[in-house]
Image (cartoon, rainbow, N blue to C red):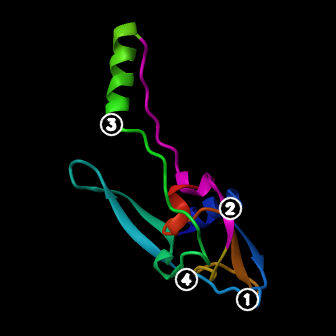
Amino acid sequence: MKDELDALDKTHTWDMVDLPYDKSTVGCKWVYKIKTQACGTIERYKAHMVAHGFTQEYGIDYEETFAPVARLNSIHTLIAVMTVRGWGLSQMDVKNTFLNCDLQEKVYITPPLGYVHAPHKVCRLCRALYGLKQVSRA
């Protein structure tokens, strides 16, 4: 949990603010996962902060959830062209990918369990958080 909270702080995912009277908060929870190696031994334990996106209301908390994605045929064509021309191909994994995306809407969440904060404050999200309806287009 500490690694996830550190990543959230490092990317300035939220600001602690007073909740505006006309807004409501979206809940959040910790989701835990055990990463194992191919042989079945435990590699590490992971924890992700996930918003209760199912409580968001269309038109109030978000407007759009469409995420542009390349078609598989386009990717196959690109790989074929790269192969014919002798170009190299690489891939990479970006840690906390969704946390790097800015949000357009003002979304407020209840502070996560284990996060030290001032009383009566909520988190106004500056960046996307797993579980939000609009995270795929952020």
Residue 57: image x %, image y %?
54, 80
Residue 60: image x %, image y %?
62, 78
Magenta range: 87-106
Is residue 100 a member of the stretch shown in magenta? yes
Per the model, the C-alpha gap separating discs 4 and 2 is 19 Å
> Which residue is identified by label 3?
72
> Which element is circle 3 on?
helix
Q: Nearer the viewer, mark 4 or mark 3?
A: 3
Residue 19 shown left or right of residue 95 in the figure: right
> Which residue is identified by label 1?
22
Sequence-wise, the earlier of marks 4 and 2 is 4
Per the model, the C-alpha gap separating discs 4 and 1 is 17 Å
Residue 88: image x %, image y %?
42, 17
| Above or below: residue 47 compared with residue 24 | above
> Which element is circle 1 on?
loop
**CB under 8 Å between callouts 4 and 3?**
no
> Which residue is identified by label 2?
104
